[in-house]
Image: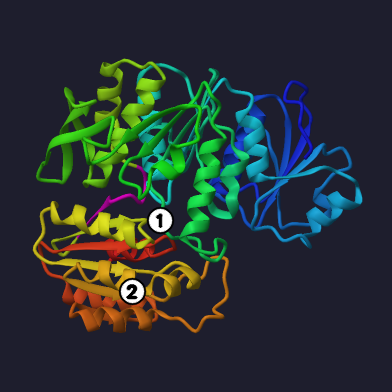
Amino acid sequence: MYELNFNIPAKLHFTGIGGISMSGLAEIMLSRGFTVTGSDSRESDITNHLEKLGATVFYGQKAENVADDVEVLIYTAAVKQDNPELVAAKEKNIPMLTRAEFLGQIMKNYKMSIGVSGTHGKTTTTSMISQILLEADTDPTILVGGIMPTIKGNTRVGHSEHIITESCEYTNSFLSFPPKVGIILNVAADHLDFFKDLDDIRHSFKTYASLIPEDGALIINSDIDDIDYFTKDLKCKVVKVGSDPEKSDYSATNITFDEFAHGSYDLVIHGEKKMHVQLSVTGEHNIYNSLASIATAHVLGLKDEDILKGLQQYGGTDRRFQYKGKVQGFTIIDDYAHHPDEIRATISTAKHYPHEKLWVVFQPHTYTRTKALLDEFATELSKADAVILADIYAAREKNTLGISSKDVMEKIKEIGTETYYFPTFEEIEQFLLKKVSKNDLLITMGAGDVVNIGEDLLKK
């Protein structure tokens, strides 16, 4: 694999520069004095921001976008090998790196690299830790998979030795990342268009843990099944966080929620109560995300006062149980949940939030996930009072499995929960305006564009 010399600024080209992760890498390289060009399918706030920083952005991907003097072309896993820019780079013998490979090389340039992995919770936990790092004045570089209000985006370019990033398991991307401190929040069946089964996923996370150096640390959720499988051969420090104080170095007791489902608890370390923690985000799942954040901060040697302030200051990222507004007296919340475990956490959170009837509009994400986890989706969605299903958001896939949202609807109906399906957002919106009552709670849920339903309702 080609190794870029980060001490000698050169010209880089990013195919797909407008993506939320690729744009962050481009911004880091611009700050280091590199010349950056890139391409994307359309203009966006992200591409406009990069252009203001000095990048040259082409709209539409063409061979002529790749100049002869480009030193490296960086591309995402979604880009096909017959892409005209990749073909041009091959013809010109320009080295190419995937986004994951390039991020891995960037991380090697920081003494303290933090990688947050897990089937879900990565964006929230990365943001929590980032908020603590900011409160502690560590001047970190931050790469997060969502919009973090504190940094007004998904990227912050710092000037210290600290970098924190999400580490996603899809296509084994995170195996290109060498974290000094690695975090494993949970391990569940997902991305089954790439992984064979849960055992394959577990093996991938075990390999990720093995990348941590002897002088580094693994922060891992002790509630993961057979946790010893991930930790038994490691030479680095291992810190366990979770619900069971007998199995965990860090746990929580006296957990309570305020009227808006914000959690608070007493932190227990090695069986001893240490301090009271107040969160400004909702749900029990965020109690455990915060335990991982505190353990990470302690490994980094940060002060408790900065940790507590950071956690209290952190109010969430976009599309994570995000309050959108009220229509006709009912509340609209939007959430990114697209896996059964995430749906369980979101609906559990909603139980602590003031409402009369809980409505969920769910847009399944990808055919493979919907097919593989059909029964689990039905079980978790049925815990709402009423469910409205939108068509499956295809993302990178084509429907070769014969699966549809009607299949999800039938499964939920079998359980006995009030359920509907409409093929268009307009039909869903008209239905909601007629059926949802004052003081009800409506959650738009999914990783696609279902958020538009709530936003459209707020305009009516």
Figure check: 143 above or below 196: above
**In the image, what residue occupies the spot 30% across and 23% down?**
307
Q: Image point 20% across, 28% down: which residue?
A: 268
Are there few (<14), some (14-19), or many (20+) residues within 10 Å of tag 1?
A: some
Q: Amino acid at mark 1?
A: Ala
Residue 375 numbered tag: 2
Query: In the structure shown, which secondary structural element does the residue marked by tag 2 occupy?
Result: helix
Q: Specify start and end residues of the magenta stretch as a single range.
A: 317-326
Along the line of sight, the residue nearer the viewer: 63 or 252: 252
Which mark is drawn over residue 188? 1
Going from the N terminus, do you reach mark 1 or mark 2 first? 1
Colour pattern: rainbow
Q: Position of residue 139 (x, y in %)?
A: 47, 19
In the rendered view, does 228 fall on the left or right side of 99? left
Q: Is residue 281 above or below residue 361?
A: above
Is residue 26 something that shows in the picture?
Answer: no
Residue 245 x, y percent position in the rendering: 21, 35
